[in-house]
Image (tube, rainbow, N blue to C red):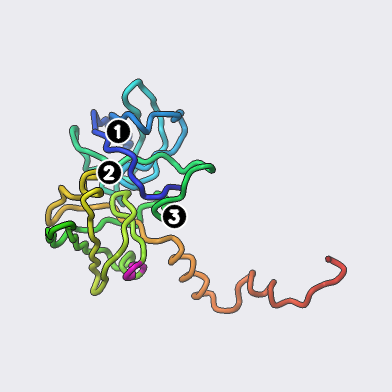
Amino acid sequence: MFTGIVEELGNIAATRSSGGIVRLHIEATRVLDGTRIGDSVAVDGCCLTVTELHASSFSCDLMAETQHVTTLGELNVGDQVHLERALSASGRFDGHMVQGHIDGVGTVGDLVHQPGATYLTIRAPESIAAYVVPKGSVTIAGVSLTVISASDGTFTIGLIPHTIDATKLGQLAAGDRVNLEADVIAKYVERLLAGGLDTPYRRLASEPADKDRL
């Protein structure tokens, strides 16, 4: 579980392909603190397992599915990536509930720079756009953001100066592809509503109390 609050920008130091697997070697500093092989790190919003650790870098593997549904397979040496360690039980829960499970890839549309903010419009696949609502949360390349408006398969978010300084979102250009994760709560609500009243939990709640079990 993550929060969508980027801890640092890492750099792709090398990539290696073998047997359909792409191994990313990522230079980092802060996220290496306390990290062990087997731990999870969000890379541009995608939850990946640390497979190698070095003094100033770590490695993780991309299977074919990850390459297919995210932008990670498109990374080249020198590219920057957003990094976040998994949330610890004692950590502060900033941002919103982020799983690190990418739902799909969106495309950057318009960028409007105004004093104090940059407004970014993203075109999202229909499967994701259905869960994006004004004032709701969405994760773009691992960054937790609030939706300003949404309509016709696009949505708009605003970037404050701190977000521009701490992430690579301010460097995006029209046509760039970004990983998207919709709010997981919206997905669960949809699933429950699709089941109507006849769900196991609803049936259990509607059953008369059995005093012998109390």
Q: Which mark is residue 72?
A: 2
**Image side of residue 169 versus residue 95, left or right:** left
Q: Amino acid at mark 3?
A: Met
| SS for callout 2 | helix
Q: Amino acid at mark 1?
A: Leu
User: Residue 105: x, y in percent?
Assistant: 27, 56
Query: Is residue 108 depicted above or below 134 in this figure?
Result: above
**Image side of residue 41 versus residue 208, left or right:** left
What residue is drawn where x is 37% and y is 42%?
42
**Image side of residue 209 versus residue 40, left or right:** right
| SS for callout 3 | loop
Query: Is residue 37 depicted above or below 202 in this figure?
Result: above
Q: Is residue 134 shown in magenta?
A: yes
The magenta segment is 131-135
| SS for callout 1 | strand
Identify the main secondary structure in magenta.
loop
Q: Amino acid at mark 2?
A: Leu
Distance between the alpha carbons at the discs numbered 2 and 1:
9 Å
Q: Which mark is residue 114?
A: none
Pick whichever of labels 3 and 1 is earlier in the sequence: 1
- The residue identified by callout 3 is 97
Q: Are marks 2 and 1 in contact (CB under 8 Å)?
A: yes
Task: Residue 132: name its quadrant.
Answer: bottom left
Distance between the alpha carbons at the discs numbered 3 and 1:
26 Å
What residue is drawn where x is 41% and y is 55%?
96
- The residue identified by callout 1 is 24
User: Residue 107: x, y in percent?
Assistant: 20, 58
Count residues near mark 3 (Cα–Cα under 10 Å), then give few for <14, some for 14-19, many for 20+.
some
Task: Residue 138: name its quadrant.
Answer: bottom left
User: Residue 188: x, y in percent?
Assistant: 48, 65
Foreground disc of the pair 3, 1: 3
Q: Are marks 2 and 3 in contact (CB under 8 Å)?
A: no
